Image (cartoon, rainbow, N blue to C red):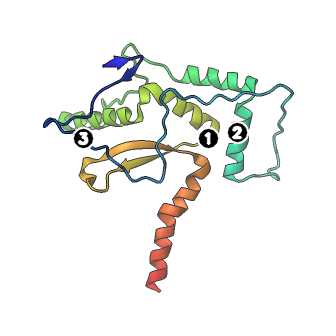
Amino acid sequence: MELFGLEIKRRVKRDGLEEPEKVLKSFVPPTEEEGVQTITSATGGYYGQYYDMDGSQTLGEKELIMKYREASEQPETDAAIDDIVNESISSDEKGASVELMLDDLQYEEEIKKKILMEFDHILKLYNFNEHGIDFFRRWYIDGKIYFHMVVDSNAPQDGIQEIRYVDPLYYLFFTFLYILNPILMLLQQDK
């Protein structure tokens, strides 16, 4: 049953038993974006920034992203970003804002169909028709965007089960913690 754009259904297998909810391992917690919206606004006054021409005040990535996010909260900047996002993302009569064209790909039709099926699967995992504009806006403000492809470690043959947004402010931390740190530990064991 669908009500107000939300789908309500039971988790029941064919044999009548309830299906247990999958617990997928990920370093990024799942985000609940259904019906939740963060609202921020500038509270009067003035706002100013300057451009560092000689690069003497170069900041790290984290500080730059925070500065970009601060600037995007200003009403004039927010309106300009909204205009850019609205002009950049458009939908066709089917409601799709992105499409994969394989006309010039020199492969058999069967392979092209598999590629299109996987592309559609990824778009569904992203919930792209609903959140594509938000993803573009985040990328436009931060200058980068990261996602974690979650695979069930007990059944990796099932492929990607979930896609989670990774905040660029914490990406370097997660990269070190889950990728570089285990490599460094292996190198230390070899000594």
Farthest residue, direction front = 17
Say whether disc 2 or disc 1 marks the residue closer to the N-terminus: 2
Above or below 88: residue 154: below
Going 53% across and 57% down the picture, which residue do you hit? 174
Q: Amino acid at mark 1?
A: Gly
Q: Nearer the viewer, mark 3 or mark 1?
A: 3
Crowding at dot 2, Cα within 10 Å, few <14 / some 14-19 / many 20+, comes out as: some
CA gap between label 3 and label 2 equals 44 Å
Question: Total number of numbered labels?
Answer: 3
Q: Nearer the viewer, residue 94 or 47?
A: 47
- Element on which disc 2 rests: helix
Above or below 80: residue 177: below
Q: Nearer the viewer, residue 148 or 81?
A: 148
Residue denoted by label 3: 19
Say whether disc 3 or disc 2 marks the residue closer to the N-terminus: 3
- Element on which disc 3 rests: loop
Above or below 23: residue 120: above
User: Which of the image's four quarters has the N terminus?
Assistant: top left
Q: Amino acid at mark 2?
A: Tyr
Could you tell me residue 65's position as x and y percent? 67, 44
Discs 2, 1 touching: Cβ within 8 Å: yes
Residue denoted by label 2: 68
* Horizontal side, residue 15 vs residue 128: left or right: left
Residue denoted by label 1: 143
